[in-house]
Image (cartoon, rainbow, N blue to C red):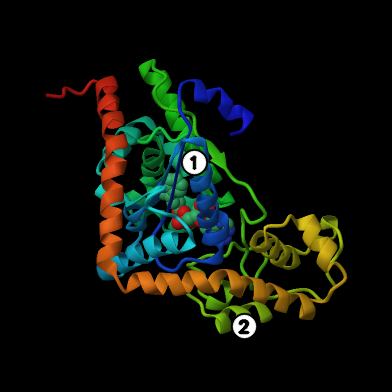
Amino acid sequence: MSDASANQTTKFQPRVFSGIQPSGGLTLGNYLGAMRRFVDWQERGLNEGFETIFCMVDLHAITVWQDPEALRRQTRELAAGYIASGLDPAKAILFNQSQVPEHTQLAWIFNCVARMGWMQRMTQWKDKAGKNQQNASLGLFAYPSLMAADILVYHATHVPVGEDQKQHIELTRDIAIKFNNDYGVDFFPVTEPVIEGAATRVMSLRDGSKKMSKSDPSDMARINLTDDADAIANKIRKARTDPEALPSEAKGLEDRPEARNLVNIYAALSGKDVDSVLAEVGGKQFSEFKPMLADIAVAHLSPISTEMARLMEAPDEIDAIIGKGAEKAREIAEPILKKTYDIVGMIRS
Ligand code: TYM
């Protein structure tokens, strides 16, 4: 735990929460920026005695249109991805957002705490709504308020995410602070975003200035967790680069976004820092480095995609796992929501 959070632990026990949208196709960005780090937190939670909670945020996914059958499949596929990456339902709580109604109940209260102006400033809202904001769903606008509820309904203190979610976690902090001030309580923790490692922002393989994303129109821009070895190697071979050899120091990656991205991916997959990777590969041409990267990516991702495919053969087992996870999650969320209702002034029988 960081120093900043040490103060919180006097009142709030450490607890980790994070979520991923089942909006189709998991990428290497999701894996390195989030899923793999969830597994590290799971182990740390086990050793240090705190809970770790990971969610498929299906209610967030429907802020843009989702085909119902596809959404069900994607939600199971995400659960399979979590488990194949190393999350273990015996160690961490793994569940589906819509099965724990306390998320949406708390989100309503947060809708009444958060201000329109706060939501309007969110870059994800601006990006996703585009020029036609009037036609975007109200859910898309209120999205960060539900996200704050996901986190705070567990009094989560730490939220591991990729760089792109930083602004949403800051808004979660603002909501917690305003709620505590408005009602004169010290009830919600001021959550820490945990953005760490070499791959907090994995970039597109076709354009080093764009995030690797499941919604990129070009499949060549991303590595999917379901890609086979040939597809992975082919995408890395065709990844955009510049003509220079690799530098031997991180400074040499400045102004070379594509080179930096591939080195970051290599560092994250090999568990090394960028400096030691460059000490190893500095001076090599991309023609030599790309096959090294492809090997390590395939070695890492192939067992995950095989295990995901195996798990997807047994959807009932997946449903049973997430059903049990939802029960455990509700045991934590229910008393926190009840207490929130009391604070706000709702009569409960
Ligand atoms: P989502 O579903 O877009 O992404 C899930 C996680 O993957 C990370 N990520 C990346 N990290 C590095 N490089 C990339 N190219 C990349 N692409 C995605 C994201 O940062 C994220 O950690 N709003 C969230 C879901 C959410 C949530 C929450 C997260 C809902 N409630 C509560 C944490 C806590 C989202 O859309 O993530």
Q: Position of residue 255 (x, y in %)?
A: 79, 61
Quadrant in which the N terminus is drawn? top right
Q: Say whether residue 273 is left or right of residue 281.
A: left
Q: Which residue is more in the foreground, 294 or 47?
A: 47
Q: Is residue 97 above or below residue 290?
A: above
Q: Is mark 1 within 8 Å of ligand 1?
A: no
Q: Any mark on residue 84, and which?
A: none
The number of callouts visible is: 2
Q: Which residue is more in the foreground, 224 or 37?
A: 37
Circle nearer the viewer, 2 or 1? 1
Q: Quadrant of residue 251?
A: bottom right
- Residue under label 2, please give it: 234
Q: Residue at x 20, y 23 (%)?
A: 346
Q: Count neighbours of disc 1 (C-alpha within 10 A) and say few if under 14, some if 14 to 19, many if 20 or more.
A: some
Q: Is residue 62 above or below residue 241?
A: above
- Residue under label 1, please give it: 45
Quadrant in which the C terminus is drawn? top left
| Comes first in the chain, label 2 or label 1 | 1
Q: Count neighbours of disc 2 (C-alpha within 10 A) and say few if under 14, some if 14 to 19, many if 20 or more.
A: some
Q: Position of residue 48 (x, y in %)?
A: 52, 36
Q: Position of residue 259 (x, y in %)?
A: 75, 67
Residue type, label 2: Asn
Q: Residue at x 29, y 20 (%)?
A: 343
Q: Which residue is more in the foreground, 220 or 83?
A: 83
Q: Residue at x 32, y 74 (%)?
A: 313
Q: Is mark 2 within 8 Å of ligand 1?
A: no
Q: Say whether residue 250 is left or right of residue 237.
A: right
Q: Residue at x 40, y 32 (%)?
A: 155
Residue type, label 1: Gly
* Element on which disc 1 rests: helix
